[in-house]
């Protein structure tokens, strides 16, 4: 049994938690294992390294556990409770007690009610306008309290351009057969990034770019009192350096995907009232189209993983995101050129 498999097995057993739970649900993600006990949740980072993160050593996992705790306390102080050491006794047995040498680190959280997560509430049809206004006000106060990022703002622009290059490289892979479907949105976003670059740079120089959440989706928003916004992206600062309107627009886009199209304009209205400095409509459209293509790409990237989980899910979902990107692109200038095979450009008709 591998070291990780042994840890997963131990943390999947109720008796490992000293009599505090009767059940444990274990869930694997791309980067972590999550263990849901009756009242608490424990996250174990996998010892993995990717171009955008590095959890490969115990020291690095400890650092990013601390970062996850620190960053998420900003919007979910009642949820993130501790960093917990996983130890190995002299006998060789794993333990969550204070006995033995540290072999890994866990982030401990209070378990939130699943039926109060925003995605679940949208599916139930039980989201109130006042609840969304509270989320918008919470986020506006959060962004207003962040230090401005003029020195690092260009990171935001470079990240945009780099990620769009990866969007194209994944979505145009021949085995996915999505080039024709995604081509218009990819070309439109490429052109808009060039045309609207001065607007983005202006927002950078005006100090509008901040260190935000980085992964603001409905499944990370809990409509409790007070609201809790969890799962801030801790492992890459560039990915959470962002225009607040881009981030909140992304949350609204994901609500659109779930059928709650009224949430997006309401969030934008609250943010504009509290923060001011809204982008123009074309820049918002660029933000939305780019994020939709990014989500489509992440869906298809799951099909390149090993082991492959839920293969039937990803292509239909990616196609829905590409359609969302096309809708956003209606607000953007039509591309002057279309990219065809091997990157050749031809004038659009």
Image (cartoon, rainbow, N blue to C red):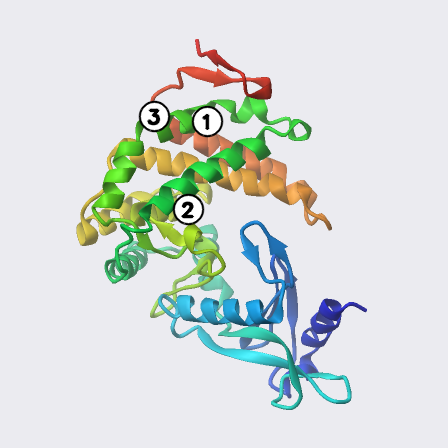
Mark 3, secondary structure of its residue: loop
Residue corresponding to mark 1: 185
Quarter of the rendering containing residue 300? top right
From where the camera sits, is residue 125 visible?
Answer: no
From where the camera sits, is residue 289 visible?
Answer: yes
Q: Position of residue 37 (x, y in %)?
A: 60, 75
Classify residue 275 as left or right of residue 127.
left
Residue depicted at x 20% and y 52%: 275
How far separated are the C-alphas under marks 3 and 2? 22 Å
Residue depicted at x 37% and y 52%: 241
Closer to the camera, 317 or 192?
192
Q: Nearer the viewer, mark 1 or mark 2?
A: 1
How busy is the neighbourhood of tag 3: few (under 14 within 10 Å), some, or many (20 plus)?
A: many
Mark 1 or 2, nearer chain start: 1
Q: In this view, does 321 lie above or below 14?
A: above
Mark 3 or 1, nearer chain start: 1
Residue corresponding to mark 3: 332
Q: In this view, does 236 lie above or below 170?
A: below
How busy is the neighbourhood of tag 2: few (under 14 within 10 Å), some, or many (20 plus)?
A: many
Closer to the camera, 340 or 315?
340
Classify residue 86 as left or right of residue 269.
right
Q: Is residue 123 above or below residue 303?
A: below
Q: Position of residue 255 (x, y in %)?
A: 41, 46
Residue corresponding to mark 2: 255
Q: Dots 3 and 2: beta carbons under 8 Å?
A: no
């Amino acid at each position: 049994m591998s070291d990780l498999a042994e840890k997963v097995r131990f943390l999947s057993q109720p008796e490992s938690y000293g009599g505090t739970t009767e059940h444990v649900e274990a869930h694997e993600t791309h980067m972590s294992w999550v263990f849901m006990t009756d009242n608490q949740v424990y996250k174990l980072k996998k010892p993995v390294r990717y171009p955008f993160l590095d959890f490969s050593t115990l020291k690095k996992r400890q650092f990013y556990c601390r970062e996850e705790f620190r960053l998420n306390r900003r919007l979910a102080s009642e949820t993130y409770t501790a960093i917990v050491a996983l130890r190995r006794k002299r006998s060789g047995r794993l333990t969550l007690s204070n006995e033995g040498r540290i072999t890994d680190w866990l982030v401990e959280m209070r378990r939130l009610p699943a039926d109060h997560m925003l995605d679940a509430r949208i599916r139930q049809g039980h989201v109130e306008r006042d609840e969304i206004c509270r989320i918008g006000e919470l986020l506006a106060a959060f962004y207003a309290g962040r230090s401005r990022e003029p020195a690092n703002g260009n990171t935001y622009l470079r990240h945009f351009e780099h990620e769009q290059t990866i969007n194209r490289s994944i979505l145009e892979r021949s085995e996915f057969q999505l080039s024709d479907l995604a081509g218009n949105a990819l070309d439109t976003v490429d052109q808009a990034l060039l045309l609207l670059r001065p607007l983005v740079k202006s927002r950078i120089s005006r100090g509008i770019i901040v260190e935000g959440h980085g992964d603001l989706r409905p499944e990370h928003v809990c409509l409790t009192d007070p609201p809790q916004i969890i799962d801030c992206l801790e492992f890459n600062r560039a990915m959470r350096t962002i225009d607040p309107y881009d981030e909140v627009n992304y949350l609204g886009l994901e609500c659109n995907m779930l059928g709650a199209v009224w949430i997006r304009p309401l969030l934008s209205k609250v943010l504009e009232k509290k923060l001011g400095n809204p982008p123009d409509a074309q820049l918002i459209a660029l933000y939305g189209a780019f994020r939709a293509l990014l989500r489509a790409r992440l869906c298809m990237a799951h099909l390149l993983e090993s082991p492959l989980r839920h293969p039937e899910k990803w292509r239909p979902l990616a196609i829905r995101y590409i359609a969302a990107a096309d809708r956003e692109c209606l607000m953007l200038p039509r591309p002057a050129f279309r990219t065809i095979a091997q990157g050749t450009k031809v004038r659009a008709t």
